Image (spheres, grey):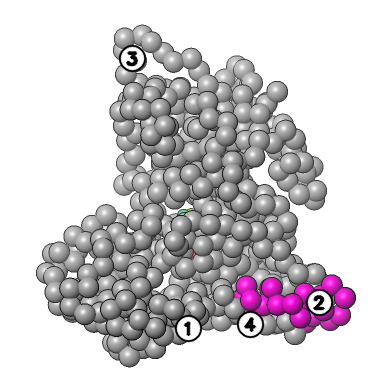
Amino acid sequence: MAGSVPIARSLKDIYTEDALNAQAQRWSKLLAKFETTYGHAPEFVSRSPGRVNIIGEHIDYSLYSVLPMAITADALLAVSVSPVKTTSAQADSYKIQIANVQEAKFPTREFDVPYDAVDIDATVHEWTNYFKSGLRGALELLRKKHGHDFRPKSMQILMDGTVPAGGGLSSSAAFVSASALAVMAANGEREVDKTALTELAIVSERAVGVNSGGMDQSASVFSERGSALFVSFTPSLKARPVYFPETSPELTFLIAQSFVTADKFVTGPIHYNLRVVECSLAAAYLNAVLNPPGARLPADAAPLGVSLYGFHETYVALAEHNNPNSARRSIPAQLEELIALTTSTLTKEGYTREEIAAVLEITVGELDQQFTSRFPVRAERFKLRQRALHVFGEALRVIKFMELLEDPAYLAQGSRGSDTSIYNAQLGALLNETQDSCRQAYECSCEEIDAICTIARAAGSYGSRLTGAGWGGCSVHLVPADKVAAVRKALQDEYYSKLDLTEDQKEAAVVVSRPGSGSALYLVE
Ligand code: NG1
Ligand code: MG
């Protein structure tokens, strides 16, 4: 699925049939508002969608494979390029003018950006930071290609985003990917390589203060209409489409909001960034105990620099030093072995900095320097065992889910029109196990999401779980088509009716999403 980001000529190239009408209206409004704002039409629109993760939660930053799919909701950036200013005052900068269709929430900004650096203040919560992080990443790529003296163009931008922020559908990755793509296109690149765009969006998003993995940006850039996306990160980033089998009853993915906003920017130090650190510490701890002395992992072992120490590298080191047979084991067998080793090695409920530093044979100061300086975290104890067990268990569930989806017996029964409920239910059971593990071992669910899952399952969902980072946000449900109405009604009666929701929120609370397409550039003729 490598290749360049597609250039769309019509909205039919971008959206599924059921979404076309509403999207066409939204696009006309965006183009018209661009004209009234800037006095001329935009040259192009860059587009990147949000995603829902089907299975594989909180394992992308440990470099295990995940299965997300793109949704219809997206970030659109309408853009025109202004001639470079040459007055002496502006000779060493270019200008970015950026506005949003939701002006009240996202105020208009104007920046003179010096040629040599894009400053991002990750300590303030500012919507345009996401644009700037895409800008910074794209410029690095352009400079690699054109040399250090490359002069970026000034840009006029109007944004329209429909992925709810803090809702677990990855508005941030959609915005950063669309921004990076817009900057590439504004600077003359019309053939933007998908892998390069994804990698730069992953690294860029960290400038906003979240030590994220690579699932969201991959899903946003690579997805193809009608299919989910199997993303693997090692030995290098790869994505392939995965088609859901014909089943009877037909399967749908229902996405339900909890309306609990989980803002990683605010809660990173006790939630998301802390989990990344806990995984990294768990890998380093296992390495220190299980591998022979001196078998130090390379710093920043993971590709894309996701974490300082990755579980995968720990395992490879383990295999090389202790048990040459391990290296030849299948991934599921490796994961089973890691689960057993974790259970026997990490026996405490939580570990203090002092305890971990002693095992790593470093000082507490060195530990903080290596693990918690770039993205600060707040914790007295690090729950290494629970986090590691979630990661290995979840990585195994992704493999089992894929095996089921591609099971010839399932495919044969589905295409014959025979009842596939037994298989459907097995897929659902894996989703339910993910939810249990997220709730108990990874502690990234919340009461509201737990309640939504219980209600949906009782009304006929095969499997229900949180999707995305958690601590609020969205849930995803595998529901037979003939039970969608019942699940909707149960959620309305038992959950949403108790909240004070606006009409728009009521409308957006539950959607049945078809797998949508990924990033695109639309040239305005
Ligand atoms: P959300 O919070 O849904 O955007 C985050 C991370 C992913 C992944 C999931 C958990 C970012 C951009 N994304 O998703 O990489 O780790 O949590 O599986 O931070
Ligand atoms: Mg996000």
Cα–Cα span, label 2 and label 4: 21 Å
Disc 2 element: helix
> Between tags 1 and 4, which lies in front?
1
**Disc sitting over residue 412 in the figure:** 2
Q: Amino acid at mark 4?
A: Ala
Query: Few, some or many C-alpha atoms within 10 Å of disc 2 (few <14, some 14-19, many ≥20)?
Result: some
Residue under numbered circle 1: 333
Disc 3 element: loop
- The residue sitting at the top extreme is 87
Q: Amino acid at mark 3?
A: Ala
Question: Does 185 appear above or below 356?
Answer: above
Left-right relation of 435 to 338: right
Q: Nearer the viewer, residue 446 or 420?
A: 420
Question: Does 290 appear above or below 65?
Answer: below
Q: Is mark 1 within 8 Å of ligand 1?
A: no
Q: Amino acid at mark 1?
A: Ala
Which of the 4 image quadrants contains residue 441?
bottom left
Q: Main secondary structure of the magenta part?
A: helix
Question: Percent position (x, y) of residue 99?
Answer: 52, 31
The residue sitting at 36% across, 46% down in the picture is: 207
Looking at the rendering, the stretch of residues picked out in magenta corresponds to: 401-421
Cα–Cα span, label 1 and label 4: 21 Å
The residue sitting at 35% across, 73% down in the picture is: 316
